[in-house]
């Protein structure tokens, strides 16, 4: 037990803590506020408190739990809504009402509910860490594996079947020294990644249904991406779209430091949205962690680690997991505040010198991995972090540190957002370093000419950017017929293909087949237009074809009616052929 000698906002300093270890969880004051040791000097410990410290003062007692900050992992995670330190918000509401009481302690998982455990091993089987002992069908989508905890191996001496709580013993494993009781819940420290056999190179895209992402700047399963952009450019909506439609098995959405109304939108929308693959509610594959801007600053940092640890747990079952962090800038600001109160030497713009390494620690826990166990299962974590640079300045430290780590950069443009073009991903500054690794997959799974279509479309957009300078000076009529056709095709790519309405029931999601058909149609129209120009057809006649409106509205064709693209293609060929008569 120690005593407080200094209080500075969420940071307190206590003496008499010589027996404590770094990152131990402590209880502070008579209200038993939750804190974590972040610095040790002699017998003095600096503690970041995850709750409001008003009323705490020198002389108050500090009790160490001698355990690191940990999360509970087991049945009941899916569909839950937690705060930054894994306290379920619905249980907090029942216990303390609309305003969270200080020091309130609530168990992360329901220890009263019984789950139907189905054993997949039998007595006498040899098992090792990561092996499945059985499973709980948590909901129609998620088969929740109950795995041998890390560090355990031996022979199954007893295995259960039936309805049990998470704390009931469902198996016993006989090791060389003793017999271990296994329950359905594991505790795992959040600041250290869960072990795996080996990291693998990503080879398959994570399909998001967002055309600008899937076509031009894809992210691989197990990849890492950043979404930087100024206020109002649509970072949160992009994250919501990815959480809704990405073909990940499990979604972990971490709202760290963003406005409460944004998390409210998520909580209101997700239960009512249907997963396009399963037809079930999206909440049946989602874990939400809400640590909004009016919650304690220190807990923002914990929320990121809580989220990635839960993601690793589902990865270890062999699932593909996507974790959304909205936003890492607010998390970095929490680091800056705690660093300042610790009186550490500041780095650029006051951020701590270890900002880059902390960001890297988070993103490197993503990836595709061969997980523990004897079955050679493969799981993945795809990490997508929103970055909120002040004033949209991408040269600030958090953006620059993030760009040095991630392989996909979806740069959002204020200019596109103000012109109501969403997603406001600027195709001239964004990039994906996974394109070369994924081109074989696209060629085999979609079409051999996919890569060629994408290159053609991007070159047309870049050509438009250079022609815009001429248009601004002398007007579009000064361009040659060929350049006017290029400008018209680029406009079609921008407005018909890249622009996507997140709130339209059809346009909110586009399968890769639909994306291919749309892009192929636009490029075909460009090629036939060029041929018509060579045959002496007037550019105005080509640009005024009535079928061009159907090309523009092809984004609203439903997935079950993709044959409509063939009809539009034939109609375009017929109309442009009639110009030669």
Image (cartoon, helix red, strand yellow):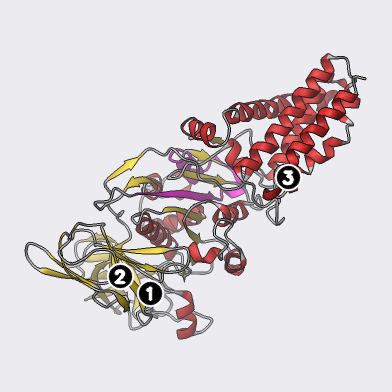
Give how far apart the Cα atoms at labels 2 and 3 are.
Answer: 46 Å
**Quarter of the view holding residue 404:** top left
Residue 109 - label: 1
Q: Is residue 107 left or right of residue 43?
A: right
401 falls in the magenta region: yes
- Whether 416 is drawn above or below 490: the answer is below
- Quadrant location of the C terminus? top right
- Quadrant location of the N terminus? bottom left
Q: Earlier in the sequence, mark 2 or mark 1?
A: 1
Q: Do residues under tags 2 and 3 come within 8 Å of each other at their CB atoms?
A: no
Give how far apart the Cα atoms at labels 3 and 1 are.
Answer: 43 Å
Residue 275 - label: none
Residue drawn at point x = 36 percent, y = 55 percent: 312
Q: Earlier in the sequence, mark 3 or mark 1?
A: 1
Q: What SS does tag 3 mark?
A: helix
Disc 3 versus disc 1: nearer the observer: 3
- Considering every residue shown, the one lying at the far right of the view is 581
- Considering every residue shown, the one lying at the far left of the view is 177
Q: Is residue 226 visible?
A: yes
Q: Name the residue that disc number 2 marks.
A: 185
Answer few, some or many: residues within 10 Å of disc 3's Cα (few below 14, many 20 plus, some between 14 and 19).
many
Residue segment shown in magenta: 378-406
**Quarter of the view holding residue 426:** top right
Disc 2 versus disc 3: nearer the observer: 3
**Quarter of the view holding residue 72:** bottom left
Residue 555 - label: 3
Q: Is residue 240 left or right of residue 144?
A: right
Q: Do residues under tags 2 and 1 come within 8 Å of each other at their CB atoms?
A: yes
Residue 130 lies, in percent from the top left, at 26, 57
Residue drawn at point x = 67 percent, y = 29 percent: 457
Q: What SS does tag 1 mark?
A: loop
């Amino acid at each position: 037990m120690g005593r407080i000698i200094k209080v500075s906002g969420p940071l307190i300093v206590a003496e008499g803590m010589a027996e404590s270890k770094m990152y131990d969880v402590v209880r502070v004051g008579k209200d038993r506020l939750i804190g974590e040791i972040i610095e040790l000097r002699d017998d003095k410990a600096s503690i970041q408190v995850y709750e409001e410290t008003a009323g705490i003062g020198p002389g108050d007692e500090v009790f160490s739990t001698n355990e690191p900050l940990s999360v509970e992992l087991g049945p009941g995670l899916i569909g839950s809504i937690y705060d930054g330190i894994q306290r379920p918000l619905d249980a907090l509401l029942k216990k303390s009402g609309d305003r969270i009481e200080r020091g309130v302690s609530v168990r992360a998982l329901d220890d009263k509910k019984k789950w139907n455990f189905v054993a997949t091993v039998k007595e006498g089987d040899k098992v090792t860490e990561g092996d499945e002992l059985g499973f709980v069908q948590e909901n129609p989508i998620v088969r929740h594996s109950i795995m041998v905890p890390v560090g355990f191996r031996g022979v199954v001496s007893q295995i259960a079947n039936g309805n049990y709580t998470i704390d009931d013993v469902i198996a016993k494993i006989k090791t060389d020294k003793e017999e271990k009781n296994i329950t359905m819940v594991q505790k795992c420290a959040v600041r250290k990644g869960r072990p795996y056999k080996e990291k693998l190179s990503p080879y398959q895209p994570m399909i998001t249904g967002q055309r600008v992402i899937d076509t031009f700047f894809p992210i691989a399963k197990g990849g890492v991406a950043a979404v930087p952009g100024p206020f109002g450019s649509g970072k949160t909506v992009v994250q919501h779209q990815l959480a809704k439609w990405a073909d990940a098995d499990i979604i972990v959405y971490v709202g760290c430091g963003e406005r409460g109304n944004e998390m409210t939108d998520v909580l209101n929308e997700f239960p009512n949205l249907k997963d396009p693959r399963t037809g079930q509610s999206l909440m049946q594959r989602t874990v939400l962690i809400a640590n909004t801007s009016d919650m304690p600053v220190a807990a923002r940092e914990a929320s990121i680690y809580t989220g990635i640890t839960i993601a690793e747990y589902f990865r270890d079952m062999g699932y593909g997991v996507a974790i959304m962090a909205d936003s890492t800038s607010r998390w970095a600001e929490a680091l800056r505040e705690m660093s300042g109160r610790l009186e550490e030497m500041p780095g650029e713009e006051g951020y701590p010198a270890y900002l880059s390494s902390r960001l890297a620690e988070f993103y490197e826990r993503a990836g595709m991995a061969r997980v523990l166990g004897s079955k050679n299962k493969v799981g993945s974590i795809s990490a997508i972090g929103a970055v909120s640079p002040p004033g949209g300045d991408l040269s600030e430290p958090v953006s620059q540190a993030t760009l040095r780590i991630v392989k996909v950069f979806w740069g959002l443009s204020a200019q596109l957002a103000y012109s109501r073009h969403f997603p406001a991903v600027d195709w001239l500054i964004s990039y994906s370093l996974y394109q070369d690794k994924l081109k074989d997959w696209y060629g085999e799974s979609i079409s051999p000419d996919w890569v060629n279509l994408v290159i053609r479309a991007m070159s047309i957009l870049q050509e438009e950017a250079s022609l815009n300078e001429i248009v601004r000076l002398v007007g579009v009529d000064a361009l040659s017929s060929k350049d006017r056709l290029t400008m018209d095709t680029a406009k079609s790519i921008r407005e018909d293909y890249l622009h996507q309405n997140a709130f339209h029931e059809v346009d909110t999601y586009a399968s890769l087949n639909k994306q291919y058909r749309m892009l192929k149609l636009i490029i075909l129209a460009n090629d036939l237009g060029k041929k018509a120009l060579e045959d002496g057809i007037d550019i105005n006649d080509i640009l005024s074809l009535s079928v061009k409106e159907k090309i523009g509205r092809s984004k609203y064709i439903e997935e079950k009616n993709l044959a409509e693209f063939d009809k539009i293609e034939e109609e375009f060929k017929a109309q442009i052929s009639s110009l030669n008569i």
